Amino acid sequence: MADSFEALVDQLNTRHLTQFSPASRELLAETFLKHESAFMIPRGVTEQIVAFNSCKIEDLMRALLPFAQTFSVSPISQFEVGVVGLGKSGNLYLGSNWELPSQHLGYSVHAEQACVSNALLAGESTLESLSLTAAPCGHCRQFLYELDGIGNLTCHNGSETNTLASLLPNAFSPKDLQVEKNLLEPNNQKWEIPGASGDKLLASSVSALAKSHAPYSGCPSAICLQTEDGHLFTGTYIESVAFNPSLPPLQAALCQRALSTSRNSRIVDAVLVEIQGASVRQKDATHSILSSLAPACGLRVFELEPLRNND
């Protein structure tokens, strides 16, 4: 993660999107620098770029893939993956893969997972299509089935376009465990901790908890990280019907940090919220990763009482 965020954004004019107008590249750079992050491009910006260049949204998504790859944190594989997702809102969401040296590979995050997590945290309701630098692996195909359970998502990889259902025929889907809910659907959960409003990290974690997708275990969780420069990054737990492709909240937050101006800023504080008596816990794994990534960072854990009639 040696390159600064500003340096990566500056590459838009020299290495990426060179087939697009200078005005388009300038607008994108201004958007990223304004929001201090590249995880989302608002609909208004994408519409302007499409109009500037008389192109389709799919052309812009494809062109953004090499840029998304530059945010990859892949010290083990040296294999940079980028994904761009189109939400029903018209917003675009970027994702890249993330790896952690000195820990087991199960802690890695795939670019598709990062993209979906970014859309969830931004409040997106549906992802309609993905553009990818490589065909999604089986792990990701299974994870993506949480989006609608029937595989309607369209995946664009180079010149190939496929539905998720065609990429994973005879899939084990959420419907096999009687789950109908799309992971991006609002779940109407309302969690409260007395006095949380006076603690920014705790308040952010509790807010993110309401977006957690944990229909199989009933054990939602969320985290908020603070970096040395003062920025906060939240992550929420996303379960997969196949369990193993599930995305822990810490990795979701770390992927957002990798796409931001704080990508090289040390993590100095973290707050994790979980459910009392949960059968699925994040505390130990979170502590292990933080100890490796940010040894001086503290981890505060809060346990909430389970909600009644939790939907």
Image (spheres, rainbow, N blue to C red):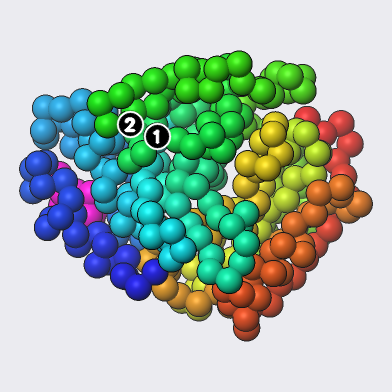
Element class at badge 1: loop
The residue tagged 2 is 157
Marks counted in the figure total 2
**Residue 24 found in image quarter:** top left
Would you say residue 198 sits in the magenta stretch?
no
Mark yes or no: residue 211 visible.
no
The residue segment tinted magenta is 23-31
Q: Is residue 29 magenta?
A: yes
**Quadrant where the C terminus lies?**
top right
Q: Are marks 2 and 1 in contact (CB under 8 Å)?
A: yes
The amino acid sitting under disc 2 is Asn
Horizontal side of 46 relative to 23 (left or right) equals: right
Indicate which disc residue 135 carries: 1
Please tell me whether the stretch drawn in magenta is mainly helix, strand or loop: helix
Tell me the residue at 41%/50% (across/down).
96
Please state the horizontal and vertical placement of residue 263, each as a whole percent of the image. Answer: 42, 67
Q: Is residue 49 depicted above or below 152 in this figure? A: below
Residue 83: horizontal and vertical position, in percent? 38, 41
**Badge 1 density bin: few <14, some 14–19, many ≥20, Cα 10 Å:** some
Residue drawn 48% across the image and 57% down it: 98
- Location of the N terminus (image quadrant): bottom left
